[in-house]
Amino acid sequence: MNQKKHLFSFVIAISISFILIAVAIFAKDYDFLPIDPVKVSRYDVDRIVYQRVEKFTDYLKDSSCESLLIIKNKKIYFLLDGYDNIYDVLRKHHIMSISNKFEELDAAWPNKINGKPDFLQIMERRSTLMMNNNEEFVSTNFGSFYKAIRNKFIKEHIDKYHQLLRKRAEAEIVINRKPIRSALYDEVSATAPQKYSTVVKVKALDDTVYSCEDYDGDGVTETFIVNAADGFNWGYKSGGNLIFIYRNTDKDIEALIGKLANEAVFGSVDDEKEMIEMFPKEKDISDLIKFVTPMEPNYSK
């Protein structure tokens, strides 16, 4: 009996491992750097950049942070949710490393996204005018502004993305769907519908590139990236320079981006309505049948 239990546990463990490996194989990794207002390539052109990261990629990169960068009239306004002082992080990394506590390195970033911006920096050109990392002060004075601008900015780019999808013949669209391998010896996976990871890239006429991904095949888009071709950055491979949402889990953001990959494959509700209206009428196709099937002129019925 114990042998059967051990065998069953072993099979379950192997099955879970295959699932995790399959997701890892088909999920795409994206280069990025957390936004640093001090290192922006230029500040003389008005701009908005939004970034949200919820995926571990490197012990020296925060895996839970959300930020909004606004450049207006050569002033930089930077808000951050999930602020950790990089010097404190590096000090903790050093202590953990010499203590061989490598499994605890991620704990060096204790502050996670909680919906309340906790860091504010205002700059003019390269000089800091104001800096504050008191969550109560920042969220009380700028929390509503932060969320409103964030949502409006994302929504505006989603509208443009939908516009491009509606003009598929003119826009450059690449859709890459790959089946996600199910676990071996997993009866549930064997009978469940096949899941697909989906990556979509759409290029606008102004060379802005929209990318979105449903990495685990659950029908929900977790990653949405918008990158302008103007070279704006805050370092080498800094990532999407307009929007960079990586492995989102927030329900408010999901309500905005959650259907993007699926809509590229299957169409949106508006697309369905338009297709229904444009679909040929039965009489038109009946007439077409007669037109493409002419009767022999020398034979009577």
Image (cartoon, grey):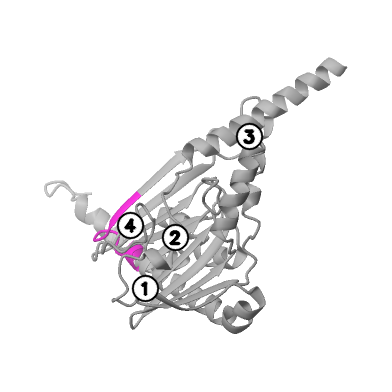
- SS for tag 1? loop
Given residues 211 and 83, the one toward you in this image is 83
Give the structural element (helix, strand or loop) at label 3.
helix
Q: Nearer the viewer, mark 1 or mark 4?
A: 1
Please tell me whether residue 198 is drawn above or below residue 256 in the rendered image: above
Q: Is residue 199 left or right of residue 117?
A: left
- Amino acid at circle 1: Arg
Which residue position holds label 1?
Answer: 126
Dot 4 alpha-carbon crowd within 10 angstroms: few under 14, some 14 to 19, many 20 or more: many
For the residues carrying marks 4 and 3, which lies nearer the camera in this image?
A: 4
- Label whose residue precedes the other's in the sequence (3 or 1): 1
User: Measuring 64% from the left and 60% from the top, which residue is drawn there?
Assistant: 111
Q: Amino acid at mark 2?
A: Phe
Distance of mark 3 from mark 1, alpha carbons? 55 Å
Separation of disc 1 and disc 2 at Cα?
24 Å
Indicate the quadrant containing the N terminus: top left, top right, bottom left or bottom right.
top right
Residue that label 4 marks: 202
- In depth, the one of 139 and 19 nearer the eye is 139
**Type of amino acid at the residue the image marks with label 4:** Val
Q: Which mark is residue 244?
A: 2
Find out whether residue 64 is within the magenta segment.
no
* Label 4 vs 3, first from the N-terminus: 3
Task: Point out residue 107 in the picture as x, y percentages from the top left corner.
Answer: 66, 49
Residue lying at the far right in this picture: please name it.
Answer: 1
Question: Residue visible at 65% across and 25% down?
Answer: 185
**Mark 4 to mark 3: distance in Å?**
32 Å
Is there a contact, CB below 8 Å, between mark 3 and mark 1? no
Asked which secondary structure carries label 4, the reply is strand
